[in-house]
Image (cartoon, rainbow, N blue to C red):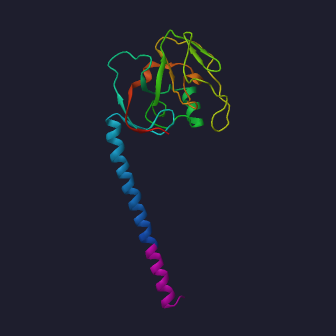
Amino acid sequence: MKTGTAAGAEMATGRKAGVARRRALAILAGGGVVMAAIAVPGWLGGLHINLTPSEPLGLWRIVPLDRPVAIGDLVFVCPPPGAVLGFGLERGYFRWGSCPGGAAPLIKTVAALAGSRIEVGASVVIDGDALPRSELIARDGAGRPLTSWTGGIVPADQIFVHSPFAGSYDSRYFGPIPAAGLLGLARPIFTVHP
């Protein structure tokens, strides 16, 4: 049995640990409430936070398209469910998010529309014109091999998307994607270049 001084010190230490645990839980719960208070209105208002280097980091807005998509449009687009999505999530090229299949929307530039002829070699050529800053890389940042798309004609109702960031995982590697995945134009609200 412990003496009065040892037992008192043990009780005081136990109380301090309990207070510290409650304080830590309160901070975590408060942080969760603040994050939800920011995320829910942002999601409802078409706001997204970009944490990838393919485009500037920061806060972006999805602006609905009130016209047909055009070459050069910077868009939010969902990657198509299936092999492209699974591979992108598995390797960490895509973040988890609200698109069908569980990925976050991508911010990419529409480089080609249905009917365009795409040639993929050391870089991308669209209808005979070189696509600037489209050089392919053989390995990703983790040293894993990357396979490029073989090229061809962009099918009906599909788009070829691109990012000028050298390490971007885009149509250079996975080919055209369904235009049905377009969410809208991507407009920066508050961004910084990495």
Rendering quarter of residue 185: top left
Left/right of residue 45 with respect to residue 173 in the rendered view: left
User: Is 41 above or below relative to 66?
Assistant: below
Magenta stretch in the rendered image: 1-16
User: Is 31 above or below relative to 17?
Assistant: above
Q: Position of residue 87 (x, y in %)?
A: 59, 31
Q: Any magenta on residue 123? A: no
Q: Position of residue 105 (x, y in %)?
A: 45, 31
Rendering quarter of residue 75: top left
Rendering quarter of residue 149: top right
Q: Give the main secondary structure, helix, strand or loop, of the magenta stretch.
A: helix
Q: Any magenta on residue 4? A: yes
User: Is 83 above or below relative to 44?
Assistant: above
Please count the marks in the image: 0
Residue name at image x 44 percent, y 17 percent: 71
For the N terminus, the quadrant is bottom right
Q: Position of residue 153 (x, y in %)?
A: 55, 10
Q: Position of residue 63 (x, y in %)?
A: 34, 27
User: Is 112 above or below relative to 166?
Assistant: above
The answer to which of 125 and 139 lies nearer the viewer is 125
The answer to which of 155 and 82 lies nearer the viewer is 155
